[in-house]
Amino acid sequence: MAQLRVYLCNDYAGLLSCDNQQRFSFQYDLKWIAKKNVPPLSLSMPLREDAYSNEKARPFFTNLLPESTVREVVARRIGVSPRNEFALLEALGGECAGAVSLLLRGVSPEKQSGYRELSPEKFHEIIQELPKKPFLAGEDGIRLSLAGAQDKLPVYMKGERVFLPQGSSPSSHIIKPGIKGIGGSIRNEAFCMALAERIGLTVPHVHVITTPDELYVIERYDRFCDEKGKVSRIHQEDFCQAIGLMAETKYEAEGGPSLADCFSLIDRFSTNPVLDRKALLEWIMFNYFIHNADAHAKNISLLLTPDKIRLAPFYDLMCTGVYEGINERLAMKIGNENRSQWIRSRHWERMAKEVGIGAKFVLRAVKEMADQIERAAAEIAVRQQAIWGPSLIVSQIQKIITRQVKYTRSSMG
């Protein structure tokens, strides 16, 4: 039976096993359970002595891996099947989302740890080769993984200097090149994230590198960097992991979580459900106004610390409505409607009832966001143009927002 030792914040938490039929099991270490004020690996796997079977263990761990084409390319790089998820975790699991590191027996978190500085030329070369070498899979000493179907690279940054984490050393930032076939994706996401912050949503700091490559840079919210530059991990998991669902079911239409399921998760586990419910409602409204049809359950997460569980800052906010050929239906229905341009007052009222929020409160919140988002978008557009130059995609997003505001006002009076 193959095994990987599971660490949280560099402390041994338990053992992940895989039998010859590719069935997972996970068992917490008794010393981890005996500690005071330690978080579980997942809310879907509370602390206990008995092992968790494949049904519970597989969703959490496989949700740490990249998806779709990125996973297939990684698998080819390391010479395994894309379906051999344990082998992928063994190859990539040194630095994952949250505080998780997966290591072979006899390998400590400190072994081969450290950072390798990249020259500007080498950094450019790595970015150019990223589609063929996702996460630099197969390179000696590099074990990086992030969920999703997009090319990205976890790095440690100190000012403008860029470093590759070695072994299980934590990264501080995530670098994203433009998405192939989706023009303007970098400026799209940078604009939407800045707009979200401007109107009150909590998001990590982001910026754009313009030379020699245009790149999107996001500061990791699941990392803490002290004054000396030392990076520590903060544990987190996305809503699919917390509910115990595979990444393949992240969309509601494919059996994934609904908005009611997301609110229920907050009600059951958040240490401040009032604030987190309000924040989640703002996320729903914001995605409606920017027409983000890809706001699924893996794009919301919870932070798990010894003393609290809270909704994480929001990420992957992007207007998908500007692109032809991308499904326009929302990933999660609002009042049983997933066509953005069809949503009216009655759908917001129905959603309010489903998630246990007063309908008047929801309608007032939607109107308030409608009243401020166009002006805020104009401010952000001017600010970003001054820094990074003009962007056609930003102008197109502003038109989408204006359209959504118009629909909202016409349906609500």
Image (cartoon, rainbow, N blue to C red):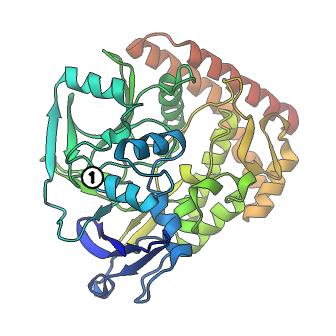
Would residue 80 be found to the left or right of residue 396 on screen? left
Judging depth in this view, the residue of 193 and 66 nearest the camera is: 66
The percent coordinates of residue 222 (x first, y second) are 36, 53
Q: Is residue 186 above or below residue 197?
A: above
Dot 1: what SS?
strand
Would residue 190 be found to the left or right of residue 94 on screen? right
Tell me the quadrant of the picture where the N terminus can be found.
bottom left
Residue marked by disc 1: 224
Judging depth in this view, the residue of 270 and 160 nearest the camera is: 160
The answer to whether residue 43 of the structure is visible from this angle is no
The percent coordinates of residue 90 (x first, y second) are 33, 59
Q: Residue at x 67, y 23 (%)?
A: 322
User: What residue type is disc 1 on?
Assistant: Phe
The answer to whether residue 216 of the structure is visible from this angle is yes
Q: Is residue 396 above or below residue 14?
A: above
Would residue 60 be found to the left or right of residue 287 on screen? left
Would residue 396 be found to the left or right of residue 127 on screen? right
The percent coordinates of residue 49 (x first, y second) are 40, 89
Judging depth in this view, the residue of 189 and 215 nearest the camera is: 215
Tell me the quadrant of the picture where the C terminus can be found.
top right
Mark count:
1
Q: Residue at x 48, y 32 (%)?
A: 194
Q: Quadrant of residue 74?
A: top left
Q: Quadrant of residue 273?
A: bottom right
Q: Is residue 91 above or below residue 218?
A: below
